Each structure stands twice: as structure tokens, then as C-alpha cells.
Image (tube, rainbow, N blue to C red):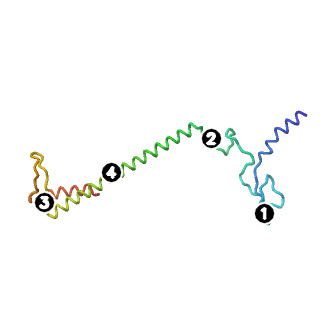
Amino acid sequence: MKIAIALIALLAPLAAHGQLLKCVYKDGRVEYAAECPADAKEVQTGIRSTREGPSSSGAGSPQQKSIAEREAEFRKRRMESAEAQKKEETKAAELAQNRENCERARIYLKSLQDGQRISQIDPRSGERVYLEDPQRPAEIARAQQAVDSNCR
């Protein structure tokens, strides 16, 4: 008697560990059951009727990662994201600076070409000195080089 009870106790979980089937009848009616009647078409659903716990090692189920591993992966992804965002911000700042330098160089070149009076501060005396006509072509060439290097 004890052996029969033990045998039933061991076989009961195996019977509950079946797969859920989709039974489609000829009139289009659909039912879900462990076994389909003879007049219904049997379709596999891939749904198990019992849940597998995290400790069970099924062939189709991937191993669960520990909380520490998931936390480490999260921190790594967050750090990589922050680095990528910092690189993008740096690149955007450099691009904005290059655009500003380009615009300034173009304005200066245009003012030289239009013949406007250009003044500079003499570093030795600190006085305002105006650009002379003989110096203008050399300054235009220097301004053109600045435009070429800043406006790519």
C-alpha cells in the first residue's frame, strides 16, 4: 500500500507537466486542452501547463543571471551611454566653435575686401593703429587662409 501511494505521488507531477494544445474544430470553434478529441485538429502552442522554476535546468530555458551580474551589466551600459553622450556633446561644441570661427573669418575678409578701415592695437605702445593700403593685400591673404582653414 505504501509503495502504491509513493508511486502515485511520484507520477502525479509528471502527468501535470504536459503541454497545452489548441484544438480547432471543423466549424471554427477553438478550445485549449491537454488532449484534443478525435474530431478536432491539434495545433502545438508551445505553452507548458506547469511553470518551470528558476532552479530547473531545461534545455530551452537560458540560465538566469544573478542580481550582481545584472547590476554590473546595467552599470556598464549606463557608463557607456554617458561616455557616448559626452562625446556627442564635445563634438557638437567643437562644431559650433568651428562655425563661429568661420563666420568671424568671413566677416573680417569681407570688410577687408570692401575697403573698410581696419584698426588694430599696437602691442608695443598700446595705441590704435589703422591698416595702411600697402598692408591690405597681405592682410587679405591672411584672412583668406583663416577662412579656408575654418570653413571646411
At label 1, the amino acid type is Arg
Question: What is the spatial separation of the Cα atoms under label 2 and label 4, in whole angstroms?
Answer: 44 Å
What is the CA distance from the residue labelled 1 to the residue labelled 2? 39 Å
Question: What is the residue that sits farthest to the front in this orientation?
Answer: 127
Q: Which mark is residue 29?
A: 1
Q: Name the residue under label 2.
A: 64
Q: Do the residues labelled 3 and 4 touch (CB within 8 Å)?
A: no
The residue drawn where x is 38% and y is 49% is 89
Q: Position of residue 80 (x, y in %)?
A: 46, 44
Please tell me which of labels 1 and 3 falls first in the chain: 1
- Displayed quadrant of residue 141: bottom left
Circle 3: element type: loop
Helix, strand or loop under label 2? loop
Report how far apart the C-alphas of labels 1 and 3 lie in the structure. Answer: 92 Å
List x then y, in percent, for residue 29: 78, 63
Mark 2–mark 3 distance (CA, rounded to whole Å): 76 Å
Q: Residues within 10 Å of mark 3 (few under 14, many from 20)?
A: few
Element on which disc 1 rests: loop
In front: label 3 or label 4: 3
Q: Mark 3 points at which residue?
A: 117
Q: Name the residue under label 4.
A: 94
Mark nearer the N terminus (2 vs 3): 2
Number of residue marks: 4
